[in-house]
Image (cartoon, rainbow, N blue to C red):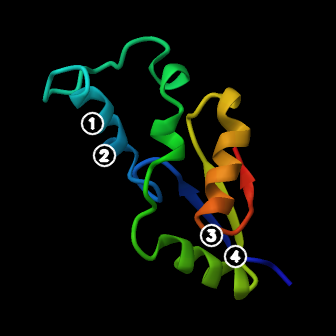
Amino acid sequence: MKKNLWVFNIDNTLANTNEKIQERVDGFGTKLCPFPLPSGFFEDNPDVFLGAAPYSGSAEALRRLEETGSKVVYVTTRSPWFRNLTEHWLRMNGFPLGEAI
């Protein structure tokens, strides 16, 4: 039997990462977010990823998909350096564990 495959981006799809980025940038004394972000921004501010709030209902929706036999996969452009942190965030927020690519 074939499984349905569902692929989800993490940042700003499941996690409100932009809100945490804006909070950090506001701490620099500016209301404008500099793009591109300075080199090393995420390495210096891992709390941006760890503290990002999941969008309401997202974890529940993905758990329901998994319960129906679907396979859930996460895609991200995050550096491999953040793999453990990303997996921790998924667990901490009740997302089903799935492959992260």
Q: Name the residue under label 1.
A: 22
The Cα–Cα distance between marks 3 and 2, rounded to whole angstroms, is 20 Å
Q: In which quarter of the image is residue 70?
A: bottom right
Pointer 3 and pointer 1: residues touching (CB < 8 Å)? no
Q: Callout 3: few (<14), some (14-19), or many (20+) C-alpha neighbours within 10 Å?
A: some
Q: What residue type is labelled 4?
A: Asn
State the residue in front, 44 or 75: 44
Q: What element carries label 1?
A: helix
Q: Please name the residue that numbered disc 4 is placed on.
A: 4
Residue 66 picture location, percent across and down: 70, 79
Identity of the residue drawn at 21% across and 30% down: 26
Q: Where is residue 13 in the image (x, y as percent from the top left)?
A: 43, 56
SS at circle 4: loop
Q: What residue type is labelled 3?
A: Gly
For disc 3, the marked residue is 94
Residue 84 in the figure: left or right of residue 95: right
Mark 2 Cα within 10 Å, few/some/many (few <14, many 20+)?
some
Whether the residues at callouts 4 and 3 have beta carbons within 8 Å, the answer is no
Is residue 38 shown left or right of residue 8?
left
- Which residue type does callout 1 highlight? Gln
Q: Kindly report the distance in space between the C-alpha atoms of the residues bearing marks 2 and 1.
A: 5 Å
Q: What's the residue type where badge 2 is placed? A: Glu
Q: Quadrant of the C terminus?
A: top right
| Badge 4 vs badge 1, beta-carbon distance below 8 Å | no
Q: Which of marks 3 and 1 is nearer the N terminus?
A: 1
Residue at 48%, 47% in the rendered image: 51
Residue to which mark 2 is pinned:
19
Check whether the beta carbons of the residues at disc 2 and disc 1 lie within 8 A of each other.
yes
CA distance separating discs 4 and 1: 36 Å
Measure the alpha-carbon separation of dots 3 and 1.
Answer: 24 Å
- Position above or below: 11 against 62: above
